Amino acid sequence: MRVVLVGAPGAGKGTQAKFLAEHYDIPQISTGDIFRANIAAKTELGTQAKGYMDAGELVPDDLTIEIVGDRLAKRDAAAGFLLDGFPRTVPQAEALDEMLANLETPLDLVLELQVDEAEVVRRLSGRRTCRNCGLVWHVEFDRPSKPGVCDSCGGMLFQRDDDLPDTIRRRLEVYEEQTAPLVGYYDKAGILRSVVATGPVDEVTKRAITALESVQR
Ligand code: AP5
């Protein structure tokens, strides 16, 4: 199964990707996570990406396309993958089409997670991430039993630099300008399914699986 998740910042792509990747036993490939790991490791890629991310802008296409090309070439992606946060521009979508055409493995489905803007702002401003294991929490919707501490590993929780109000606003503008056109792009290709991504996380997962199964059959 080769799937792309598309949706506004905070739509729940990372949250759902974790469950769906486990359910279908395919790797979750998140460009945001790859950039953040590079920032933490202070690599050249991380240094280049950080300025864009902190400003709420997209990392340039050439850099992003290259890291996804390298990641998709790894053996664990041969039987399928779930892309979370890529593509994010039409040139990235065209580059992905080309990569997959060369491998003769076209996408099965693009799943759009639909959430309104007010909900996105609530989700992003309350999101907290574990510094140790990367698990994502929310101060209101998915509270750890002890504030600021991860229930799973005891690590300290932190707020992402790009989850501050001005940056959230810019990320939403960038989504509308550069990423929302992908919905039309994939609809035209006949591989788009959309699900309402509000309500309990497990309900959204069920809707997503129903959409994915409709294509598998
Ligand atoms: P990235 O990390 O991809 O961020 P994003 O797309 O902005 O998405 P988020 O991670 O913010 O949100 P999400 O949809 O995964 O939501 P989550 O599940 O965490 O990218 C960051 C930056 O990297 C970009 O701005 C850009 O600079 C760069 N970048 C990345 N990819 C790029 C690319 N392809 N090209 C160029 N640049 C790129 O959920 C959010 C919160 O809501 C959590 O607290 C969660 O607990 C909560 N939540 C989730 N589901 C529910 C629910 N059903 N009900 C209530 N709360 C919920």
Image: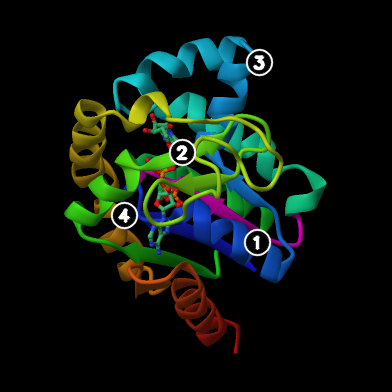
SS at badge 3: loop
Judged from this view, the residue extending furthest toward the bottom is: 217
> Amino acid type of disc 2?
Arg
The CA span between labels 1 and 2 is 22 Å
List the residue tagged with mark 4.
Answer: 182
Can you tell which mark lies on residue 41?
3
Can you tell which mark lies on residue 128?
2
List the residue tagged with mark 1.
Answer: 21
Residue 81 on the magenta segment: yes
Sooner in the amino-acid sequence: mark 2 or mark 4:
2
Residue at 37% over, 52% down: 140
Can you say whether 150 is above or below 59 in the image?
below
Residue at 35% over, 20% down: 54
Sooner in the amino-acid sequence: mark 1 or mark 4:
1
Sooner in the amino-acid sequence: mark 1 or mark 3:
1
Sooner in the amino-acid sequence: mark 1 or mark 2:
1
Disc 2 packing (10 Å; few <14; some 14–19; many ≥20): many
> Amino acid type of disc 4?
Leu
Q: Looking at the picture, how far across and down is residue 103, in whole percent?
A: 68, 54
The CA span between labels 2 and 3 is 20 Å
Q: Nearer the viewer, residue 154 or 106?
A: 154
Disc 1 packing (10 Å; few <14; some 14–19; many ≥20): some
The N terminus sits in image quarter: bottom right
Labels in figure, total: 4
Sooner in the amino-acid sequence: mark 3 or mark 4:
3
Q: Nearer the viewer, residue 133 or 55?
A: 133
SS at badge 1: helix
Can you say whether 48 is above or below 36 in the image?
above
Query: Between tags 2 and 4, which lies in front?
Result: 2
